[in-house]
Image (cartoon, rainbow, N blue to C red):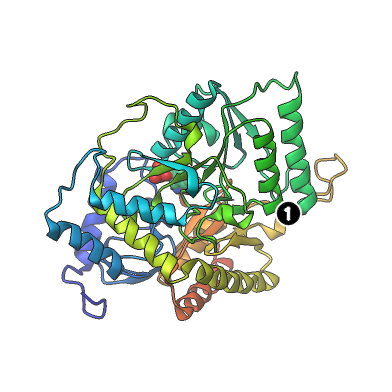
Amino acid sequence: MALTEPAPVASAAAHEGILRRQSSRESAARTYARSLPIVPVRARGMTIEGADGRRYLDCLSGAGTLALGHNHPVVLEAIKKVIDSGAPLHVLDLATPVKDAFTTELFSTLPRGLADNARIQFCGPAGTDAVEAAFKLVRNATGRGGLLAFTGAYHGMTAGALGASGGATDIQVTRLPFPLDYRCPFGIGGERGATIAARWTRNLLDDPKGGVPTPAGMIVEPVQGEGGVNPAPDAWMRRMRQMTADRSIPLIADEVQTGVGRTGAFWAVEHSGIVPDVMVLSKAIGGSLPLAVIVYRSELDTWRPGAHAGTFRGNQLAMAAGAATLAHVRENGLAARAATLGARMTARLQGLATAHPSIGDVRGRGLMIGMELVDPEAAPRADASGDGIEDTAPPPAPDFAAAVQQECLRRGLIVELGGRHCAVVRLLPPLTLTDEQATAVVDRLADALAAAERSPYRRTATGSDH
Ligand code: PMP
């Protein structure tokens, strides 16, 4: 149904009732539902319509899942085709024509050098399960235990993935500095900061007394998403590739959020030209339905049958929707479109920063954009830490970011918050957004920012999620 007609169930009372029941029945651990009191009843492309009849431009896109936006015709068509064919919807990990077509399409997109020699493991349907599979794979193949991961990383909520994201775990995870331009831990940023971050890692790996036995693998996001939209510099990625290759440490690229054109290349590792040993893929590969896989160099395929099992590894609808999405992104050059539009939106936001000292930084890659909000009044004293290195970034402003998010919502724009201090406004629009929608997103965000600056902002207990 076109969104020009009113939604059949639209009513303010229904909207209120559903939200009330949600807050009295659902877990205290719920996340997006707290900061986004919306009851979606219909959606098309970038537009969501709530039960109260309100419309929103969706820059959250299912936490970066909806490469083609909501209910794209090619996705709906692919789903209908499977249903109409009478194919079984549940098949464990058996072979089917739908799965065969998905695998062929996925392999056709993979970086050369991996595609020629790759294996695929279908995992349980969440990204975090594929991360667990990747860890299991490399630990099995290397016979080693520990893992290398980076500060600010997010890989999921199950034990191993959580450990690699900085949470408590039994796995030995060594946390390494991720290169940051803004708030660089070495106080330098840029290429030099990234070089020092890489040097730290190399020294640690080669220091016989460094306390880090040769690990089973290194996991990295080419652009950290939940960590605040931090693109890894290409030269640093190449250093990580070289360093791990030289030491026979498998490199795992977590492309759960960055994949399928999002960053302006089909896969974000293509920016640096590296070929990882393992890629973790989920979100957009399922075309809005749950699907998660790992693809990896076939030499690593030494684990035993059943080493990573799971009942829901054969979602036929997700595979059909995913194959249609991958093909559509590829055939329509949507990665290049994401690069162009993303650069335009980022430049406009950077322009906005010159007039708004509350914008500390604007960064991103393609249509993965972050705007870090700060408290300009609390500008850091030069050399506040007394170590001779000047701190230039004002403190982050999470309360203000929450206020901006609410003002965006009032203006019909859904944005996500993320970053270490939850002070980064994140934009993850679908790759199909039009020029007009891109302009409207920045206009509404600018307006929301100005409104939040005018009003004393209040704290909302939200927290980013994934
Ligand atoms: N890795 C990355 C880079 C992610 O962004 C996420 C989710 N935001 C995950 C893994 C975990 O995926 P899921 O929520 O589907 O378990």
Tell me where residue 381 appears, x and y as whole percent.
81, 50
Taking the view exactly as shown, the residue that stands out farthest to the front is 116
At 37% across and 40% down in the image, what residue appears?
29
Q: For residue 165, say whether it is visible.
A: yes
Which corner quadrant of the image does residue 384 belong to?
A: top right
Where is residue 258? Give x, y as percent. Answer: 50, 54
Q: Quadrant of residue 69?
A: bottom left
Q: Quadrant of ligand 1?
A: top left
Q: Nearer the viewer, residue 413 or 91?
A: 91
Q: Nearer the viewer, residue 2 or 218?
A: 218
Residue under numbered circle 1: 393
x, y percentage for residue 61?
40, 60
Q: Is residue 382 left or right of residue 366?
A: right
The x and y percentages for residue 355 are 68, 73
Q: 256 and 141: which one is in front?
A: 141
- SS class, disc 1: loop
